[in-house]
Image (tube, grey):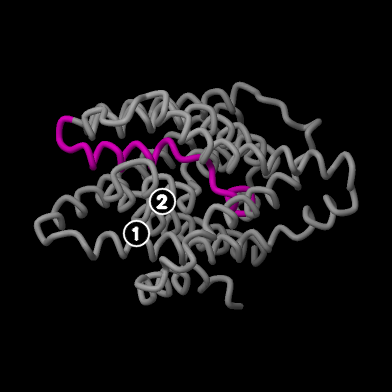
Amino acid sequence: MIKPWMLPLAMLTGVLFHSAIDKVQFLAPYLIFTMLLITFCKVNPRELKVDVFSLRMLAVQMLGGIAVYFAFLPFSDDLAQGAFICVFCPTATAAPVITGMLGGSVARVAVYSIVSNLAVAVTAPALFEYMSGASTGGEIGFIEGFSTICIKVGPLIILPMLTAFVLLAIAPKVHHAIATRQSLSFYIWAISLIIVVGKAVSFVMKEPDDAIPGMIAIALASLVLCCALFIAGRRIGRRSGDPVAGAQGLAQKNTVLAIWMALNFLNPISSVAPAAYILWQNTINSAQIYFKTRRSARNEKS
């Protein structure tokens, strides 16, 4: 019964104990790695078929992220980076679960989750280095910055998938044991959320009062983008006969990873965008589950 309260409890814990987060923040990459490993273990490599659905979704994620960055750049570099990370961020590990609850194709979202994460792993280093270089005047060489980000981002996303496939080949019992314990990723995600929210709060608390309007603007931009992604995903999914999978695959983001990337590779204040996105996407998903449950109850009665 505690599951529905896990999100607000994790966020509240991060806010209340933000001053102590520095002592445990080194755990965040390891928790994200474990969370992705558990997710990838439930995907059969033979079922990894990238179709038109995935390509359309990926185009919105990649090109859309770059487009919103340049669209918001004239207003503020922080706003542009916050908007970018909301669109560019890969699909949440919990997306297949929510998709199943709403009656969509779990397999389709699981496949797109892998495509989405791999695309981020490949393109993030160059994009992050370009954006951080543009905001700092290019103080760090591109090659140096690019290689540093590759070392930090690439393994975090690619290695969990490779580990899952290796386990399937050499230790199928271990692979099966992990694959059948998908609920663990939810609780690991909650712990990760405490850390990244705490770190984001610590940063925001140190910002001067005159930064508050900018942070509010970033949070509101993430709301607009969240709604736009749900709408765009539903339209893409409808073309493939699965609007639910489209909406969840495109709009339900791995915000833990997004906040971590923003704090480590972009202007830290841009982390306000994915932090606010947590509230927006979960509010929308909660509403969808509520109305889906009501419709199901009415159909049973009739």
Image quarter hosting the N terminus: bottom right
Amino acid type for the residue under numbered disc 1 = Ala
Image quarter hosting the C terminus: bottom right
Task: Give the answer, above or below, for where 93 lies relative to 125.
Answer: below
Left or right: where does residue 32 sit relative to residue 13?
Answer: right
Task: For residue 10, say whether it is visible.
Answer: yes
- In the figure, residue 240 lies in which quadrant? top right
Q: Residue furthest left?
A: 210
- In the figure, residue 12 lies in which quadrant? bottom left
Q: Secondary structure at mark 1?
A: helix
Residue at 43%, 28% (x, y): give it: 146
The reply to whether discs 2 and 1 touch (Cβ–Cβ < 8 Å) is: yes
Residue at 45%, 51% (x, y): give it: 255
Q: Secondary structure at mark 2?
A: helix
Q: Which residues are magenta?
A: 74-98
Q: Is residue 83 magenta?
A: yes
Disc 1 residue crowd, few under 14, some 14–19, many 20+, Cα 10 Å: many
Amino acid type for the residue under numbered disc 2 = Ile
Residue 219 at x, y percent in the picture: 27, 52
Return the residue at label 2.
259
Residue at 63%, 44% (x, y): give it: 104
Left or right: where does residue 253 sit relative to residue 202?
Answer: right
Q: Is residue 122 magenta?
A: no
Return the residue at label 1.
200
Gap in angstroms between the C-alphas marked 2 and 1: 8 Å
